[in-house]
Image (cartoon, rainbow, N blue to C red):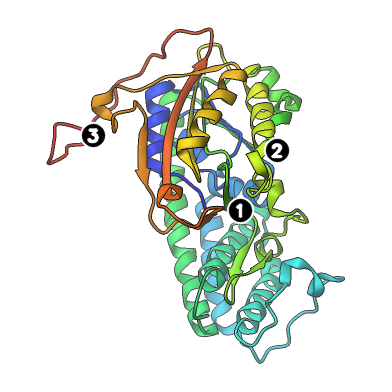
């Protein structure tokens, strides 16, 4: 729900790293940083406190064979005749029926999609390899989100079957393109860029043995936003009711409240817990990354005029200093801002458009000089020489 654009990730990685260097995303979410890093010949490490994020990131960054893709496509096509609501659905294990994961999926509008998902999950055993089953779960997750999350009208089971098949084809094409990019870099560099995905909080990164050996040159991430409620772990169905169905579909563990994923309740006075956990996270990062590393963040604020200054103060306390960009390339304050339409987040304040603003912040360690920026091909723009 708060992912950033692949183009931004690609541009930042090309600007601040060389092939073979390490990129770190301690709040990896859907894995955009890791996908772009691996396709550009960089090694990468991604961590997140959510098992769902780790599942999705692993699926998006894995290398799969043509045989695996054919198996998953054949599996999705075979479901057309099997996702029949008249079929007997396999019983759910234990108390899953009454858990948070399936809450609100037994209503009059939602039960057909819930039953179709159950039938599809029961067919995963027909796929012989773990990679194939993981990709199939990802296809099902994407289709179920389309069918349930934020929908005013729930689609029919027939529409669900058609979209499932289309998503399998589309995702297979995407993975083929990703594989070609990664293997093309491998041929050029003489090795296959690696990706490590772990479920852990950013403040505990020091426990990761790999980071005792390698020193990332770039941190590219989008941490939780202060004062903004983002549903990282739930879908909203039937008028805003929250369900943990994505964990059921992906086969991952949840059991946490929203504040677990967002550094604390956005309604807490002064956001004390948020800033405490933010400082702990970036203090841990400071001791693990290279001395000449660059930290690039995409952040949003419910009240930028009050929260930005404190956010920058926390970064300073954690041992970082901000690098402002040339003003001719920005809106005037040396930072890159953008307005984000149709974003699924909720600020404590219900008035004003500031909650839809995102900003790119660039930091380096307090003791280092300004970062060296590699030349990146600019994009022609009708209103100027570059953007």
**Front-lying residue, 359 or 250:** 359
- Expressed as whole percent of the image width and height from the top left, the position of residue 148 reads 56, 72
Gap between marks 2 and 1 measured at Cα: 18 Å
Are the residues flagged by discs 3 and 2 in contact, CB closer than 8 Å? no
268 up-or-down from 376: above or below? below
The kind of secondary structure element at disc 3 is loop
Crowding around mark 3 (Cα neighbors within 10 Å: few <14, some 14 to 19, many 20+) is few
- Expressed as whole percent of the image width and height from the top left, the position of residue 202 reads 67, 33
Lower position in the chain sequence, tag 3 or tag 2: 2
Residue position for label 1:
232
Residue 330 occupies quadrant: top left
Residue at position x 42%, y 53% in the image:
352
Lower position in the chain sequence, tag 2 or tag 1: 1
Residue at position x 45%, y 64% in the image:
169
Residue position for label 2:
273
**Front-lying residue, 208 or 107:** 107
Residue at position x 58%, y 66% in the image:
140
311 up-or-down from 31: above or below? above
Tag in front: 3 or 2: 2
Residue 281 as seen in the image, left or right of residue 340? right
Lower position in the chain sequence, tag 1 or tag 3: 1
Numbered marks: total: 3
**Front-lying residue, 158 or 2:** 2
**Looking at the figure, which quarter contains the C terminus?**
top left
Crowding around mark 1 (Cα neighbors within 10 Å: few <14, some 14 to 19, many 20+) is some
């Amino acid at each position: 729900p708060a992912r950033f654009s692949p183009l931004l990730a690609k541009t930042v990685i090309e600007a601040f790293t060389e092939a073979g260097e390490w990129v770190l995303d301690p709040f990896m979410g859907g894995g955009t940083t890791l996908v772009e890093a691996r396709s550009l010949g960089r090694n990468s490490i991604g961590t997140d406190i959510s098992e769902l994020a780790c599942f999705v990131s692993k699926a998006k960054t894995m290398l799969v064979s043509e045989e695996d893709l054919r198996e998953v496509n054949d599996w999705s096509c075979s479901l057309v005749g099997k996702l029949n609501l008249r079929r007997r659905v396999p019983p759910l294990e234990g108390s899953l029926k009454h858990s948070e994961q399936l809450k609100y999926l037994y209503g009059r509008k939602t039960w057909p999609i819930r039953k179709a998902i159950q039938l599809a999950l029961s067919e995963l055993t027909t796929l012989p390899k773990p990679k194939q089953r993981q990709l199939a779960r990802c296809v099902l997750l994407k289709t179920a989100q389309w069918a349930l999350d934020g929908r005013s009208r729930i689609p029919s089971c027939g529409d669900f079957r058609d979209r499932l098949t289309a998503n399998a084809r589309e995702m297979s094409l995407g993975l083929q393109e990703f594989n070609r990019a990664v293997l093309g870099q491998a041929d050029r560099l003489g090795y296959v860029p690696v990706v490590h995905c772990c479920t852990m909080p950013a403040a505990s990164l020091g426990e990761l043995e790999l980071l005792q050996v390698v020193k990332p040159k770039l941190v590219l991430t989008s941490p939780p936003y202060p004062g903004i409620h983002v549903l990282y772990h739930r879908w909203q169905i039937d008028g805003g009711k929250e369900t943990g169905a994505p964990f059921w579909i992906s086969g991952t563990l949840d059991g946490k409240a929203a504040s677990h994923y967002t550094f604390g309740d956005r309604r807490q006075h002064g956001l004390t817990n948020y800033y405490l956990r933010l400082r702990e996270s970036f203090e841990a990062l400071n001791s693990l990354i290279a001395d000449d590393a660059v930290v690039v963040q995409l952040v949003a604020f419910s009240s930028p005029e009050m929260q930005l200054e404190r956010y920058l103060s926390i970064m300073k306390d954690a041992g970082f200093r901000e690098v402002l960009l040339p003003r001719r390339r920005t809106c005037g304050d040396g930072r890159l801002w953008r307005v984000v339409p149709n974003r699924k987040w909720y600020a404590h304040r219900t008035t004003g458009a500031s909650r839809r603003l995102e900003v790119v912040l660039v930091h380096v360690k307090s003791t280092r000089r300004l970062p060296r920026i590699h030349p990146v091909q600019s994009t022609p723009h009708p209103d100027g020489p570059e953007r």
